Amino acid sequence: MDYNFLKHTELFKDMEEGEIKSAISHYHGYEKTFENKEVIYHTGDVVDEIGLILEGSANAVAYDYWGN
């Protein structure tokens, strides 16, 4: 995990590398890579974690009953 990068994010600004490591460890943080167009969560999924996008982007998409 790139702790130097994390030090420059809003979530971890003003924290030392050791504090960031401790916080990530405490909250069972991990790094995960997704393929292009891979679904991260589906509508209705129960989500019990937060994430940071370190590189690239993600789209939030909502479909109605008819698939629009």
Image (spheres, rainbow, N blue to C red):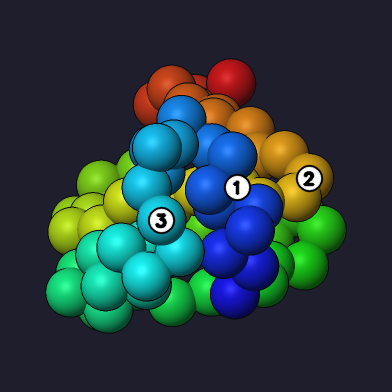
**Mark 1 is on which residue type?**
Ile
Q: From what the image shows, is residue 34 above or below residue 9?
A: below
Where residue 24 sits in the image (x, y, percent)? 32, 69
Marks 1/2: CA–CA distance: 7 Å
Can residue 39 be seen by looking at this rendering?
Answer: no
Task: Say if mark 3 contacts mark 2, CB within 8 Å.
Answer: no
Write down the residue under mark 3.
Answer: 16
Give me the residue at 25% from left, 47% from top.
Answer: 44
Name the disc covering residue 56, or none: 2
Name the disc covering residue 34, or none: none
- Quadrant of the frame with the C terminus: top right
Foreground of the two, 24 or 33: 24
**Mark 2 is on which residue type?**
Gly
Foreground of the two, 12 or 55: 12
Where residue 43 sits in the image (x, y, percent)? 35, 43
Numbered-mark total? 3
Where residue 11 sits in the image (x, y, percent)? 39, 38
**Mark 3 is on which residue type?**
Glu
Where residue 10 sits in the image (x, y, percent)? 46, 30
Q: Earlier in the sequence, mark 1 or mark 3?
A: 3
Query: Badge 3 local density, few (<14 within 10 Å), some, or many (20+)?
Result: some
Assign a secondary structure to mark 3.
loop
Write down the residue under mark 1.
Answer: 53
Task: Say if mark 1 contacts mark 3, CB within 8 Å.
Answer: no
Marks 3/2: CA–CA distance: 25 Å
Give me the residue at 54% from left, 37% from top.
Answer: 9
* 48 with respect to 30 (left or right): left
Give me the residue at 40% from left, 37% from top.
Answer: 14
